[in-house]
Amino acid sequence: MSRPVRPVVLPAVCQKYPNGLIPQDEMVQVDPSLGRFGWLVAPAARAQRAMVAAAAAAGFTLRATGYYRSLADQEALFRSRYTPHLVPPGKRWRLRFWRKNPGVASAATPGTSNHGLGLAGDFAEETDGDPGAEGLTGALLDWLEANVVSFGYSWEPGIDVSEPWHLRYFAGDVIPARVLAFEAGDQPVSTRRSDVVFLAKQVGTEQVWLIDGNKRYIMPPPGVSVYQRRPEVDPVPMVLTPEEMNAFTVTV
């Protein structure tokens, strides 16, 4: 199956600021473990959560090594991978022609990256339970090729083959139907397996719980990250009302 490529429609927030200069309060944190690289603009974040949850339901732990990239971070990355020259060939930037160094991945010219718009993620799969991710397996890549467009994501033209990990949100402020269905709760807890632990955020509070398919929940000890506590945890919290929380039993 070929990798789908779609033109990008910019959400309104991306049109308000220069590439790489979007304030953090205009974005949503999707992965705290990535620090300043763990943010996306809201439409992309909503789609990312739904896509990660759907991948988990299909048996994959979809992670990312980075999302938003500031202009300064993009420039540092670009300079680490390219060398300036006075004459072509190369990417034209700051009165120089920049040629890619051998053995490294390409990088967008500073000020032109979809990472700087808060729309892109470099995705990988978590397979061995440690904090890092192990790249994309063939099975997960097949799943992405068949599903990403329904979440408003696609590959980027020109690097869809060389960088299969790089996906960008293209749907603007129109939230895809599959994302809305996920947010409406079309993935009930009762369908989830008892051998897999999920995250749930309690409505109206900052409480985040670990929940298994047997409807037991555990509050992680203070200072312990739920991502570190159980490597098989679904990184996308499902939101539960107080009434739904009362239907669960506490496991100490």
Image (tube, rainbow, N blue to C red):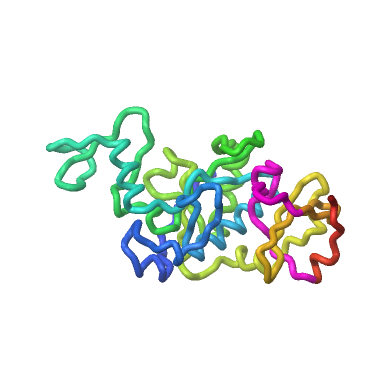
The boundaries of the magenta stretch are: 219-242
Q: Nearer the viewer, residue 164 or 82?
A: 82
Can you give x and y, in whole percent of width and height, for residue 39 in the image? 49, 56
Q: Nearer the viewer, residue 205 or 187?
A: 205
Q: Is residue 2 visible?
A: no
Can you give x and y, in whole percent of width and height, for residue 202 in the image? 71, 65
Magenta span has 238? Answer: yes
Magenta span has 234? Answer: yes
Among all residues in the image, which is located at the extreme top? 102
Can you give x and y, in whole percent of width and height, for residue 158 in the image? 37, 45
Q: Residue at x 40, y 51 (%)?
A: 69
Quadrant of res 26 = bottom left
Q: Residue at x 47, y 63 (%)?
A: 27
**In the figure, 19 relative to 88: above or below?**
below
Can you give x and y, in whole percent of width and height, for residue 37 in the image? 46, 50
| Numbered marks: total | 0
- 247 vs 129, left or right, is right
